[in-house]
Amino acid sequence: MSGRPDSGTGPETADSEAAAGQDESVDPLAASDDPLDESVDPLSASDDPWEDARRARWTAVGTGAALTLAGLAAALLRLTRSAPALVPAAYAGGAALCAAAAVLGSRGRTRRALWLLVAGVMVMALGDQFD
C-alpha cells in the first residue's frame, strides 16, 4: 500500500457508514424527547399563521355557540322553577355575551371574543350564586 492516508473507499468505511446509519434509525424519538427542543411542537399541526387564525376563529365561534345554548337552556330551566327573577336574567345575559363573542370570533376578533366568553361565564356563575 502507498503512504497516503485512507481515502475512505475501503470496506472498513462502508461498514462504519452502515453502522452509523443503523444507530440513527434505532430510536427516532430520541431527538424529540428533549423538552427544550424548539424544533418539535406536537401541538402545532402546521407553521401556517393563516391556519392558526382560522382555527382560533372556529374555536371562538364553536365555544361561543355552545356556551350560548347552555346559558339559554339554564335560563329556561330556572324560569320554570321558583327562583328569583335575577337568576334566569343572569343566565340570559351571560348567554347574550357569549353570543356576541361568537359573532366577534367569526369576524376574527378572537382576543375580544375570549374576554367576552370569560365575562359571559362569570355573569352566569354570578347568577347561579343567587339561586
Image (cartoon, rainbow, N blue to C red):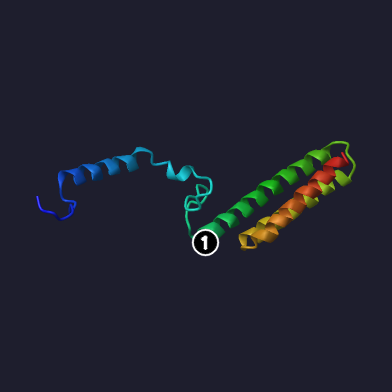
Location of residue 128 in the rendering, given as x and y in whole percent from the top left corner: 83, 41
Taking the spot 55% from the left edge, 55% from the top edge, the residue there is 55
Q: Is residue 15 left or right of residue 103?
A: left
Closer to us: 62 or 122 = 122
Residue 4 in which image quadrant:
bottom left
Location of residue 29 in the rendering, given as x and y in whole percent from the top left corner: 42, 41
Spot the residue most to the top: 81
Location of residue 129 in the rendering, given as x and y in whole percent from the top left corner: 86, 41
Q: Which residue is mark 1?
A: 49
Residue 19 in which image quadrant:
top left
Q: Quadrant of the C terminus?
A: top right
Q: Is residue 83 left or right of residue 43?
A: right
**Count of marks, rendered view:** 1
Location of residue 26 in the rendering, given as x and y in whole percent from the top left corner: 35, 38
Q: Is residue 84 left or right of residue 73?
A: right
Taking the spot 84% from the left edge, 48% from the top edge, the residue there is 89
Taking the spot 77% from the left edge, 50% from the top edge, the residue there is 94
- How many residues crowd around disc 1 within 10 Å: few (fewer than 14), some, or many (20 or more)? few
Check disc 1 and give the amino acid type.
Pro
Determine the secondary structure under disc 1. helix
Taking the spot 47% from the left edge, 50% from the top edge, the residue there is 40
Spot the residue most to the right: 84
Residue 14 in which image quadrant:
top left
